Image (tube, grey):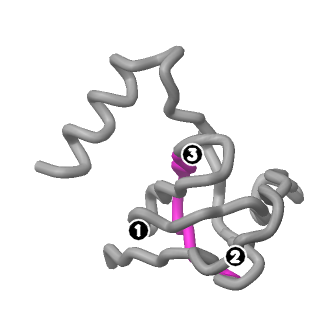
Amino acid sequence: MNQHYEFGSNNKGPIQDHDLIMRGRRLLDITGVKQVESFDNEEFLLETVMGFLSIRGQNLQMKNLDVDKGVVSIKGRVFEIIYLDDQHPEKAKGFFSKLFK
């Protein structure tokens, strides 16, 4: 399942806070999400107010999606959380090239 969700583009208020809250490596709540670029049961790619965020794991599912508040909740076994930014361009390039093959 590969879908795209865009969040609060009509929000003209202050920049949202961005937080990650993980509970027992099985539940992950993320705020400050601008859009969900793609997701499947092994990987989520989110655009947050602090850059692109990749979450990798096993049996990942979107538990909650609040487009108005920019909140995403993910359940499943989380293996890796990575911000893809200018500090790691080669990793980001490799990730995006795999994503758009």
Front residue of 93/24: it is: 93
Callout 3: SS: strand
Whether residue 54 is visible here, answered yes or no, is: yes
From the top left corner, tell me how far across and down residue 83 is, in percent: 58, 35
The relative height of residue 60 versus residue 83 in the rendered view (above or below) is below
Left-right relation of 42 to 24: left
Residue at (79, 65) in percent of width and height: 29
Q: Quadrant of the N terminus?
A: bottom left
Query: Pointer 2: residues within 10 angstroms few (<14), some, or many (20+)?
Result: few
- Magenta span: chief secondary structure: strand
Callout 1: SS: loop
Label 2 or label 1, whichever comes before in sequence order: 2
The relative height of residue 75 versus residue 21 in the rendered view (above or below) is below
- For the residues labelled 1 and 3, the Cα–Cα distance comes to 14 Å
- For the residues labelled 2 and 1, the Cα–Cα distance comes to 27 Å
Q: Which residues are magenta?
A: 53-65
Query: Pointer 1: residues within 10 angstroms few (<14), some, or many (20+)?
Result: some
Label 3 or label 2, whichever comes before in sequence order: 2
From the top left corner, tell me how far across and down residue 94 is, in percent: 27, 29
Residue at (68, 70) in percent of width and height: 75
Left-right relation of 36 to 2: right
> What's the amino acid at mark 1?
Asp
Residue 57 inside the magenta-drawn segment: yes
From the top left corner, tell me how far across and down residue 93 is, in percent: 29, 28
The quarter of the displayed image where residue 77 is located:
bottom right
> What's the amino acid at mark 3?
Leu
- For the residues labelled 3 and 2, the Cα–Cα distance comes to 21 Å
Residue for badge 2:
11
Residue for badge 1:
40
The numbered disc on residue 53 is 3
Front residue of 61/47: it is: 47
